[in-house]
Amino acid sequence: MKTQDASSSSRNPGLTRRTLLRQAGMGSLAAGLLATAGSRALTLDTSPVHEGGVAVTPAGAPARHEVELVAQEFEQEISPGTTARVWGYNGTVPGPEIRVREGDLVRVRLRNELAVPTTIHWHGINLRPGMDGVAGLNQVAVAPGETFGYEFTATPAGSRWYHSHTDPALQVPMGLYGPLIVEPLAPIRAWDREYTVIFGEWDLELTPDVAAGRAPRGARDQTLRGGELGSDLFLINGRSHGLIPPFVVTEGERVLIRLMNAGHLPHTFHTHGHSFRIVATDGNPVPPGMEWTKDTVLIGPAERYDLELLCDNPGVWMVHCHMEHHMANGMMTLLQYEGHLPTGPAAALFGNGTPASGHEHDAAVPPDATPSPAADPAGTPAEDGRQVEIALVDDRIDPPEVRVAHGTTVVWTNRGSDWHSVAAFDGSFQADRIAPGETFTHRFGQPGTYQYICKHHALQGMTGRIDVT
């Protein structure tokens, strides 16, 4: 998602109504490459005049974009406390967003730093066969250490994307995909704010060694038929749970959500408190007056839907995949109106109006919380043997509140089927990941009130409190 509030991506402004009105008397619009934070992609426009972060060229003069995409292996945190070795472009999954104008000339230099051959397919773009990126059929795969130049005219306009088409059953799930936005020459709609959302899945048994053929598939993946992969985490823009930033909006705005599915499973996108209009399918605009109004849309692998949402119901709302185990294992975020807090207990998690992320659990200490920097290290047994167990059951803590004497050791046990975590608001204890059947212990040596969350499921109500006397 493209938002200044995102820790994992940068704000890429889309077409606003105000910008369109300005440009109506100035000629056509061309957007250069707006890369996500940390990427190394390049853009070269022939005669850019930057206005409001968007490159504008004279009417009738297509721009030329020269972009470098580096296919490489790197580490990315995909869930609070879980870092994986991934394959991606320019150091980020998804790869950097490429945003151009219909009719522009696009030249992409692919540099392969992987240990295996690879290519890029430009999904939804009508181009010459030799540029389509299908290894074997359209081109020789780009060998490790080699480069290849793609060139095409950006057409048709709409929400497109790019991904590997060499061994795609493994390279795409490893992270080799990214968004490609082709702005139309004659827009029929305009929006105040825009987000790009790419769904995906992560298989913990799929490692670079497995994808490169240096190691056998994991035990579970070997049992699946037809080469199917298992899915442990469900991703929005390459991340899950508390690492997914919210959709931040203002009342009265019209927001465009470009929804893309880079995974191999279907997902259902659902917005609480709002309906949306489907204004494009696979990047192709729906004629005005023929849009569907829905609050849930099923999106299959490789599909795209452009959704228009009118922000007319202020508050903080859930947005998630309605396949419930996908939500419970990462595919969930928020629609948050600026200046608004949740109406339930989750309001305590919001510091400065934004929810605490997996690394910011101490950013929103409630007024009645008593910080305890002198708390004893986790795992130290109580001198007199006093011990209390708290169960982490999927979506709830049992019991959510306990009262213990100082010197008591609390044992959190994961009795559910999902990953969980515990993190104190004051930073005195933290377990990033507690797998099913695992435990985490902490001895409370000082009196006080300790509030904590499951960083994976705090927005679903997994908050707890320990009163130490």
Image (cartoon, rainbow, N blue to C red):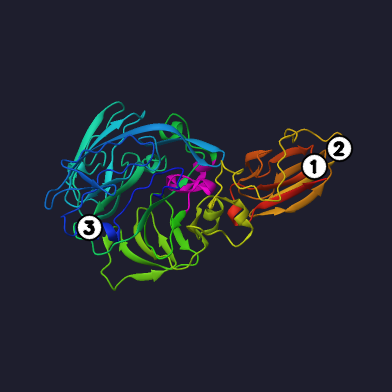
Q: Is residue 280 left or right of residue 340?
A: left
Is the residue marked by circle 2 packed among few (<14), some (14-19), or many (20+) residues within 10 Å?
few
Q: Residue type at mark 2?
A: Gly
N-terminal label among 2 and 1 = 2
Question: Which residue is labeled 3 in the image?
Answer: 22
Tag count in the figure? 3
Alpha carbon separation for disc pair 3 and 1 = 62 Å
Q: Nearer the viewer, mark 3 or mark 1?
A: 3
Q: Quadrant of the C terminus?
A: top right
**For the residue marked with disc 1, what is the amino acid?**
Pro
Depth check, front residue: 22 or 294: 22
For marks 3 and 2, give the CA distance. 72 Å
What residue sits right under mark 2 in the picture?
385
Q: Is residue 138 magenta-colored?
A: no
The answer to whether residue 124 is seen in the rendering is: no
In the figure, is residue 8 to the left or right of 410?
left
Give the magenta range. Answer: 220-246
